[in-house]
Amino acid sequence: MSEKIVVWHNPRCSKSRNGIKYLEEKGIEYEVRRYLDEPPSVEELKDLLKKLGMKPRELMRTKEKIYRELGLKDVEDDEKLIEAMVEHPRLIERPIVIKRDRAVVARPETKIDELLD
C-alpha cells in the first residue's frame, strides 16, 4: 500500500503545476495543500524543515518583494525567519512534496523521484 503524498502547491506557479503534472503522469495519488490559503504553523514548518534537511533561509524565496521589504537578508535568527514564512507564506519555496518523514522541494520536478520507493 502506498503512503500518502502531500504537495504544498501554489496553482499560479508553473514549477508547482509541473510537479503536480509529474505526479499525475506517473499515476501517483497525492493530496494538495494550498499553503497560501492554509499557511503552516510554526511547528509544521519546523517539522517540514527537518524532513527537508534544510535551514529556514534555504526554503525561502529570497527574490520575493516581501523578503526585501521585511529586511530578512540581515536576519540571522532562524526563529524569526520561520515566523516570517508563517506570516507571509509567499516566502516559502514551492512546490514541496512530502512523503512520510521525507520531503523535497521539487525543482526540477524530477526531484520527486527521491521520495518514490
Image (cartoon, helix red, strand yellow):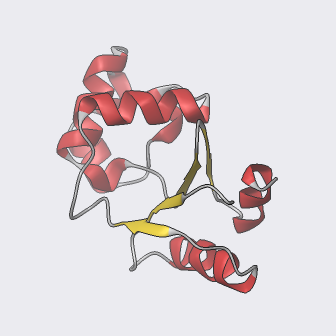
Q: Residue at x 44, y 42 (%)?
A: 60
Residue 24, position in %: x, y?
A: 65, 83
For this orientation, the residue located farthest to the top is 77
Work out whether residue 24 or residue 91 is closer to the camera in this orientation and state it: 24
- The image quadrant of residue 101 is top right
Quadrant (top left, top right, bottom left, bottom right) of the N terminus = bottom right
For this orientation, the residue located farthest to the front is 1
Left or right, 81 with reference to 113: left
- The image quadrant of residue 108 is bottom right
Total marks placed: 0
Work out whether residue 94 or residue 24 is closer to the camera in this orientation and state it: 24
Residue 37, position in %: x, y?
A: 21, 64
Q: Residue at x 53, y 35 (%)?
A: 58
With respect to residue 115, does 37 lie above or below? below
With respect to residue 16, does 62 lie above or below? above
Residue 88, position in %: x, y?
A: 22, 48
Left or right, 108 with reference to 6: right
Residue 87, position in %: x, y?
A: 17, 42
- The image quadrant of residue 52 is top right
Work out whether residue 94 or residue 44 is closer to the camera in this orientation and state it: 44
Q: Residue at x 49, y 59 (%)?
A: 6
